[in-house]
Image (cartoon, helix red, strand yellow):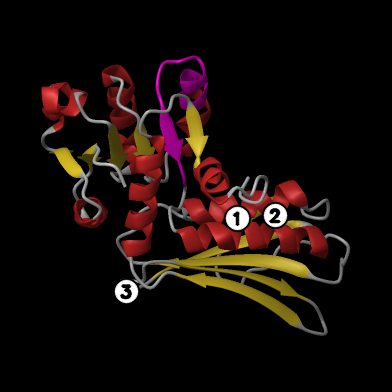
Amino acid sequence: MKNIKIAIIGYGKMGHLVEEVAKSYGMEISCIIDADDTEKFASEEFRKSDVAIQFSTPSSAVDGILACFAAKVPVVVGTTGWDNSLPELESMCKKGAGTMLYAANFSIGMNIFMAVNRYVTQIMNEFDSYDPSLTEIHHIHKLDHPSGTAITLANQLVAISSRIKKWIEKELGVKTEKGVLPVYHKREGEVPGIHTITWESECDSIVLTHEAKNRMGFARGAVSAAHWLAGRQGFFTIGDFLSDVTGMKGVFS
């Protein structure tokens, strides 16, 4: 990978991992901006960054993105829980006011899992004896629920299946009426992230699970996406990045 200057926004566990991975790839950390030193957004070091990577909090995410837009620094965003503002920011990017790449989950394995989810959902659309449910488990420090990844998976199911009209977050074990996808969440220990999609019938069950072993996969995916984003302009998703690097158009969309 070429030597680029990366600004880190949010210096919690993910920010530290991003720093570790970026340095191992030979990249330079131009500056680190945490919640108590946001004045660094006005610094020369930040303005001269090739790209920023943000893993902050839902409440500070939009301000950090707008600061990147103002400084003309492309930003990779892994913070979740603020998605209501995404359409407006996407519109700004398409009008030339900023550059960003957003993903609810930067794990390469998870994005392969999402591609499998889309494919299986297409097949299961023809078999109405199977009803889906979705469960996500994360560490006790994760504030938002369902997870951004779970929301993405649920939206995929609704968009692809003509049998599933909507999804609703429910307490564990509480079922929904047919045609409504129940989404469950658990918060326990230090679990990095487990997402399970179950297709249940009277005869059998089909269970698809992705389990993150640690947070390193998220950091590696984000740094790789940042390397790809540097020098580009507009709004992108991790699907754009993966489609480009694999040459497999449409698989990750």
Can residue 164 be found in the magenta stretch?
no
Front tag of 2 and 3: 2
107 or 189, which is in the foreground? Answer: 107
C-alpha separation, residue under disc 2 versus residue under disc 3: 29 Å
Q: Residues within 10 Å of mark 1 (few under 14, many from 20)?
A: many
Number of dots carrying numbers: 3
Which amino acid type corresponds to the residue marked 3 in the rendered image? Gly
Kindly state the secondary structure of the residue where label 1 is placed: helix
Which amino acid type corresponds to the residue marked 2 in the rendered image? Leu
Q: Position of residue 157 (x, y in %)?
A: 70, 54
In the rendered structure, are the residues bearing label 3 and label 1 in contact, judged by CB atoms less than 8 Å apart? no
Name the image quarter holding residue 176.
bottom right
Look at mark 1 in the image and give the residue it sits on: 153
C-alpha separation, residue under disc 3 versus residue under disc 1: 23 Å
Q: Earlier in the sequence, mark 3 or mark 1?
A: 1
Q: Is residue 191 left or right of residue 234?
A: left
Can residue 96 be found in the magenta stretch?
yes
Look at mark 2 in the image and give the residue it sits on: 157
Look at mark 3 in the image and give the residue it sits on: 189
In the rendered structure, are the residues bearing label 1 and label 2 in contact, judged by CB atoms less than 8 Å apart? yes
Q: Residue furthest toward the front?
A: 2
Taking the spot 42% from the left edge, 69% from the top edge, the residue there is: 212
In this rendering, the answer to whether 215 lies above or below 144 is below
Q: Which residues are magenta?
A: 89-103
C-alpha separation, residue under disc 1 versus residue under disc 2: 6 Å
207 or 147, which is in the foreground? Answer: 207
Which amino acid type corresponds to the residue marked 1 in the rendered image? Leu
Taking the spot 65% from the left edge, 76% from the top edge, the residue there is: 207
